[in-house]
């Protein structure tokens, strides 16, 4: 499905209002292929759990790819979605308090969240589609574009897709990024393409034990309560399990596992790592201050253990699902976007073989 100044709405850039003209989209509905399909806010997903973990409890996701074109010169932060996060929140606060509350102030969860907080994760992540490997600002001239990805989790958030699209148009028109001459860069939304992803059915191709995980935007992971600057197998496994379990409990069919997944040894090892630490600066208009958030970027080569077929399949599926869920802290700002490849590059494979020979 593609929104191009969406046919469902007439858009008035003067008043920044979107008025529905063809399809009624109400809270609790899900947009599928251009049609609205009513889905209960807490879908009756299959609640069975497997001791080893089962992804069938994961919620459905809605993925929006948003292309922004600069109208004049614009300067965005190195992680441009840190600016989009605040602009979208402000737009929804003005246009749809219900959508704002659902995305930015979710209340409660289907089950208590294991871990350091009882608060559910936000049912939305943002990220730029181009890798962010440094701290230089993104400078755009008139007509240049960049693309952001918005992923919504669960039927309630997905039911507000229309309001979110409206908010993205408003955020772009009001301005993003660093103020130049007293005004933030204004953008035109060229198009928004959206698709549904059934996370429970995400399976990596092939059956190789070797795989690659690229940290496309800075990733902020905690292990044993502290942020890490080097990504070990233990820290990655903990992040994958906790992130997936929290989203399943809050917006899906319940717990991913019976508690044992976080207690076992990681079912994979990191065979090669090229990781660097970058420091992302972001300004918070709400808090009136600038903050610096460190995060890891780079590539990991991973070897998944094959001794337990069920855990082998689960580990590879969790790695693949992380492409949509993102990992670590600050995912709604754009941190933690990863790219999974169910293979190891030949150069890395040759290096690994030479080390073991």
Image (cartoon, grey):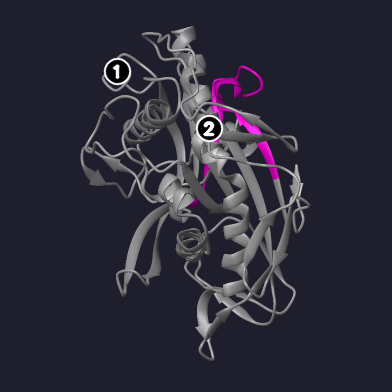
Instruction: Give the residue at x 54% y 91%.
Output: 181
Q: Position of residue 156 (x, y in %)?
A: 50, 36
The quadrant in which the N terminus is found is top right
Q: Position of residue 239 (x, y in %)?
A: 36, 35
For the residue labelled by badge 2, is the local secondary structure a helix, a strand or a loop?
Answer: helix
Q: Tell which circle, 2 or 1, labels the residue nearer the N-terminal end.
A: 2
Q: Nearer the viewer, residue 175 or 99?
A: 99
Q: Nearer the viewer, residue 303 or 151?
A: 151
Taking the image as shown, residue 33 lies to the left or right of residue 134, namely right
Residue 79 in sight:
no
Q: Position of residue 33 (x, y in %)?
A: 74, 35
Is residue 87 one of those drawn in magenta?
no
Instruction: Give the residue at x 30% y 69%.
Output: 287
Instruction: Give the residue at x 52% y 15%.
Output: 313
Taking the image as shown, residue 104 lies to the left or right of residue 190, namely left
Q: Look at the numbered discs 2 and 1 and tell me whether their residues touch, using CB distance below 8 Å.
A: no
Magenta-tinted stretch: 194-218
Q: Position of residue 92 (x, y in %)?
A: 50, 58
Q: Which residue is denoted by mark 1 in the rendering?
A: 264
Q: Which residue is denoted by mark 2 in the rendering?
A: 155
């Amino acid at each position: 499905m593609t929104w191009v100044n969406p046919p469902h709405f007439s858009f008035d850039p003067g008043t920044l209002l979107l008025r529905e003209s063809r399809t009624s989209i109400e809270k609790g509905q899900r947009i599928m292929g251009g049609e609205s399909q009513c889905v209960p806010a807490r879908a009756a997903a299959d609640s069975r759990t497997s001791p080893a973990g089962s992804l069938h409890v994961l919620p459905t996701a809605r993925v929006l790819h948003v292309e922004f074109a600069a109208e004049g010169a614009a300067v965005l932060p190195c992680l441009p979605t840190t600016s989009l996060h605040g602009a979208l929140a402000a737009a929804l606060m003005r246009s749809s308090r219900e959508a704002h509350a659902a995305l930015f102030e979710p209340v409660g969860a289907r089950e208590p969240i294991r871990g350091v907080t009882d608060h559910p994760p936000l049912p939305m992540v943002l990220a730029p589609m181009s890798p962010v490997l440094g701290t230089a600002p993104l400078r755009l001239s008139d007509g240049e574009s960049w693309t952001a990805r918005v992923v919504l989790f669960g039927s309630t958030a997905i039911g507000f897709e229309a309001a979110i699209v409206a908010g993205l148009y408003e955020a772009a028109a009001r301005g993003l990024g660093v103020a130049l001459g007293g005004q933030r860069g204004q953008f035109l939304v060229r198009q928004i393409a959206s698709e549904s992803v059934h996370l429970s059915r995400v399976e990596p191709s092939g059956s190789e034990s070797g795989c690659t995980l690229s940290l496309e935007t800075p990733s902020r992971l905690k292990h044993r309560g502290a942020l890490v600057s080097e990504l070990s197998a233990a820290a990655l496994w903990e992040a994958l399990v906790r992130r997936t379990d929290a989203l399943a409990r809050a917006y899906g069919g319940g717990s991913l596992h019976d508690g044992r997944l976080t207690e076992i040894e990681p079912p994979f090892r990191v065979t090669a790592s090229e990781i660097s630490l970058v420091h992302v600066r972001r300004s918070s208009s709400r808090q009136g201050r600038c903050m610096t958030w460190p995060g890891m970027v780079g590539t990991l080569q991973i070897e998944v253990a094959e001794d337990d077929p069920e855990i082998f399949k689960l580990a590879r599926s969790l790695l693949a699902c992380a492409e949509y869920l993102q990992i670590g802290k600050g995912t709604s700002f754009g941190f933690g976007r990863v790219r999974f490849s169910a293979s190891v590059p030949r150069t890395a494979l040759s290096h690994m073989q030479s080390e073991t020979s």
